[in-house]
Every structure is written in structure tokens, then in C-alpha cells.
Amino acid sequence: MEILQRRSTTAQVWGAAEEFIRLFHRETPGAGDPRTRLAAVRAELAESGTYRHTPQELVHGARVAWRNSNRCIGRLYWNSLRVRDRRGLTDSDAIAAECFEHLREATNGGRVRPTITVFAPDTPQSPGPLIWSEQLVRYAGYGDHHSVTVGDARNAPLTEALLRLGWSGGAGTPFDLLPLVVQGVDDKPRWFDTPADAALEVPIRHPDGDGGGDGWADWGLRWHAVPAISNMCLEIGGIHYPAAPFNGWYMGTEIGARNLADADRYNLLPAVGRRLGLDTSSDRSLWKDRALVELNRAVLHSFDRAEVTIADHHTESRRFLTHLEREERRGRDVGADWSWIVPPISGSATPVFHRTYEDRQVSPAYVHHPGAQDRAQGRDLV
């Protein structure tokens, strides 16, 4: 179910709808007998080939989709997800405006709130809108994918496509905000500049460098506060919402051990190693490991100093085990992808490393719809 086919038969939708409606009524006190609701859904399907979730069903479905996300370690708070119902919006201008408002509300002055904004679903008459951007906030990568001189190499193809489409580019720094790319119903994809007040960014400093003259501030490192994934599809009871950006908060290693450290992203470990005076001539000196830890210390210190929500991998690992225990007490199995749950540094020092998990796929879910990766890289954008 990782790759979703956007078209379903009425029988397939009914089967998924029945399963979800029964789940919703089991888990929602006061929802009543599901048979009345199921009869209404069946009638709506017979008439139009689709059905509309009630606001309460949408909220519960979005939250359970987070609960079912096998690659997410931060599911303890799944039931606190704020759901912004924007199903009436189908055109790119309105969708872009609501995406930027999503960022403002989720940022919450630094106290990041898990949030999802749900736009119009696919219907038998037409597909719903799409957000091409992988996340609501992305940094440009100037150059081609094999030779990026400035910025985030992951976003080089999208940056190149946007430049061809007419974007004038940013200031040429390693952290220029890319426009958001949105495709409305019956429309071609369009790009929208991110308003300055929508993307809170945190300057990255090392805790031992403040006032110590080590030059970390001179690097101009920073990262955005809200990790809002925007190119996955929310599937609830057979209904597909292809534009449904959602966020939790960052775990420090996502930034310090992946975004800033990966060789095909910002590749900062060699520079950090040299700055720390480490022997970078041989891997046996473990200079990469030491540089990785210091880079992650800098990320956590900086977010804390800016009073922006962030989790460390040790705490989040313990929270995940608490989530497992709570779900087991409720008689619910928890699926997980070990390769994603175990943090990218100090894995064996965390309790999630020493367990096995079943990578089981259930619905509701967040899934990749066809062509999501191609769109995130700007292919066929022009």
C-alpha cells in the first residue's frame, strides 16, 4: 500500500468504507450504531460512486493514519493531531494560501503543533489537487543533481525546473527558500513564493562556540522549524485526499544526521571535522562519528535556544515504547519499519534498536500516490 492507485472501483470503496466506519464507531464514544451510517454511505456510493466523510470521521481518520504510520517514531501523540478541514478548496491560489496559513498555525510561535490540512479528495469525476513540493518548506539546490555548488542537492532538479518556469531564484545562499508548487483541479502546476512570516528558521550554533570565536555563526547554517510533508496522500475508508500536508515536530537527528550531514544533501561532516581539528585522513580515526555528534549537539542547542520544539532521539525512542505499551493495552497491534524507527546515530544506545517489529500496512494511512517522487523533483513541470 506504499504506492497508491488513485482510481478505485465502487466495490473497493465500499469495502474500505465499511471497514473504516466500523472502526470509527468502535473507537468513538457516543457515535451510535454504525448500521445507520453504513446505509447512508451505501446509498451515497450507489448514487455518485463516492461518499463524503463527516467532520468527525475526517478528524479520526487523519489521526488514525498517523497512528498507523510505520515509519514514524513520534506517534505517541497521534490523538492530538489538529485537523484543518479545507475540503472545499480546489484551486491552486486558495490551496497555497492555506498551506502558508498551516505553517503559521503549526509553528505556533515555536511551540510546534502537529497539524494536517485536508483539501478536496479524488472523485469519480476528477482527481483532487496535488502539492508537488515534498515538504511545504524546502531549500534550493543550485546546479545539477551531480554537481550542486550551493544548497540542498536533493532539491536541485526541482530548483532547475522552477528556474526554467520563471522563478528568478533566491539570493544564492545555501538556504534559499523554494517556492511551493501546487496543482489545482483542472489546472497546471503553479509556483508560489513562501511569505517571510510563514517559515520560521532557526540559526544553527554550537553550544561551545557562543562567544568562543569558533566561527559557527559565520557559516550561516539554519533550518526551518516545521517538517510539513506535503506530497503524500491521506487515504481514509477508500477516499483519497491527494493534497493533505501534515507535520509533527523535528527529531534532531533528522536535521543533524541526515539533512545537514548526508553526502547527497549538505555534506557538512568534512567541514565540521576540519573545524574541530580532527584527523580526517582516515575513517579509522572515527572523525565522521565525532563530527556527527557535534553537529547534532549544535542542532538541539540551537532549537532550544530559539525556544522551538524539537525532540532528541533518546527521548523519542522511549516515547515510542510508551506508545507501543498503550496500544497493546488497548488491544491494537503496532506496525513499524525498523530501518526508520531506529535513529540514524547511536542506534544501539536507544531501546527501539533491541526489538523487532512487523512492518504491517493498514488503513487509514498516508501513502505515496503515483508519480509523487517525480513531481517532487520537478519532472514534467515545464
Image (cartoon, helix red, strand yellow):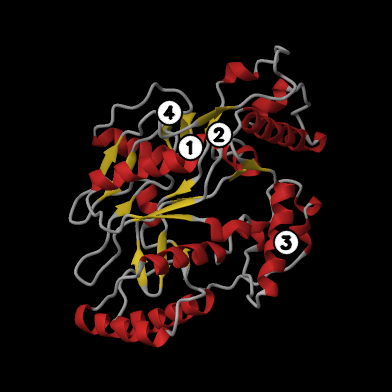
Amino acid type, residue under disc 3 in the picture: Leu
Cα separation, mark 3 vs mark 4, equals 38 Å
**Measuring 41% from the left and 67% from the top, which residue is drawn there?**
56
Q: Nearer the viewer, mark 2 or mark 4?
A: 4
**Residue 273 image point, x, y percent:** 71, 27
Amino acid type, residue under disc 1 in the picture: Ala
Q: Answer whether labels 2 and 1 touch (C-beta < 8 Å).
A: yes
304 to 44, vertically: above or below = above
- Residue 112 position by quadrant: top right
Amino acid type, residue under disc 2 in the picture: Tyr
At mark 3, the secondary structure is helix
Cα separation, mark 2 vs mark 4, equals 13 Å
Q: Nearer the viewer, mark 1 or mark 3?
A: 3
First in sequence: mark 3 vs mark 4:
4
| Residue 321: mark in rendering | 3
Q: Residues within 10 Å of mark 1 (few under 14, many from 20)?
A: many
Amino acid type, residue under disc 4 in the picture: Asp
Q: Which residue is mark 2?
A: 266
Q: Which residue is mark 1?
A: 153
**Residue 144 image point, x, y percent:** 41, 36
